[in-house]
Image: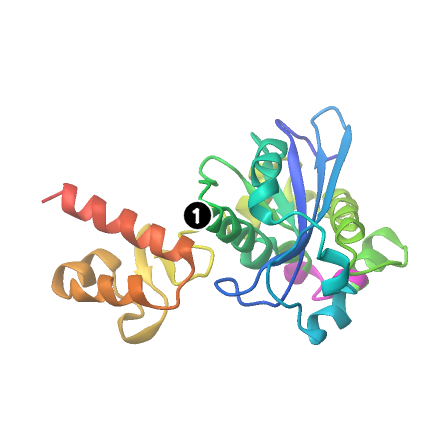
Amino acid sequence: MKLELQRPIAFIDLETTGINISADKIVEIAIVKITPDGNRLVKRKLINPQMPIPKSSSDVHGITDEMVKDAPTFKQIANEIKQFIDNCDLGGYNSNRFDVPMLIEEFSRAGMEFSTDGRKMVDVQKIFHQMEQRTLSAAYKFYCNKTLDGAHSAEVDAQATWEILEAQVERYPNIGTTVESIVKFTGEDDIVDFARRFIKVNGIETFNFGKHKGKAVVDVLKIEPQYYDWMMKGDFAINTKQKLTEILNRTLLKK
């Protein structure tokens, strides 16, 4: 079987200054876009994060302050990136928990709205972990029988992720051949916020952390409205705050 695409899917891989979505920045982005007719388009950019790259991060991806000192900032390329992935579903490896949330955070910092509404998001790691429990390099060896030379180069990782998904579609008939069926299989077709501060329980947006964990967000905002102010002032991702505001606004409209 082959993966059936109804519209383009963009596989995204980021290299960053660290793993804190609200504080760290992108230093490299690579996007491998696959169109329904099978064409492959690639965009790769080094990005000046306007902050020092910790040695621990450089040791992983090999990108140093010197390499990005003359590179554009994310704000300078934000519109280019947005246009490249316009009308695309999104894919990646651990992308629903890191790459996509980080990308949305950078768009927000740049003052540009980027919505995932209507997009399907395929996290290849989710399929892999449910089926085989391995890392990206092991996944590439397992599914594609190749050695992943140049791991932690964003373009290499993004391309490998696409190849892995194609191999997974061949190997696991039960996940289907469409983006919709794959997202349904991974159980990530109904995300509230990417930091997972909220989750849906029986279709209801529910707190997934802190003293209100397990409680409906709407109920907490009605009983303890100051909790909204506390979160908005706290060290939460912009996307989390935006979703909280959306829930609050819907609550107010129902009054």
At a point 55% along the width and 55% down the height, the residue shown is 102
What crowding class fits label 1: few (fewer than 14 Cα within 10 Å), some (14-19), or many (20 or more)? few
Tell me residue 155's x, y (percent): 77, 49
At a point 66% along the width and 62% down the height, the residue shown is 129
At label 1, which amino acid type do we have?
Answer: Asp
Q: Is residue 202 visible?
A: no
Tell me residue 78's x, y (percent): 57, 41
Q: Is residue 87 left or right of residue 236?
A: right
Report the residue marked by disc 1: 190
- Which residues fall within the magenta stretch? 129-137
Tell me residue 239's x, y (percent): 41, 53
User: Is 16 above or below relative to 4?
Assistant: below
Tell me residue 130's x, y (percent): 63, 60
Q: How is the image coloured?
A: rainbow
Picture quadrant of residue 87: top right
The residue tagged with tag 1: helix, strand or loop?
A: loop
User: Is 159 above or below relative to 134?
Assistant: above
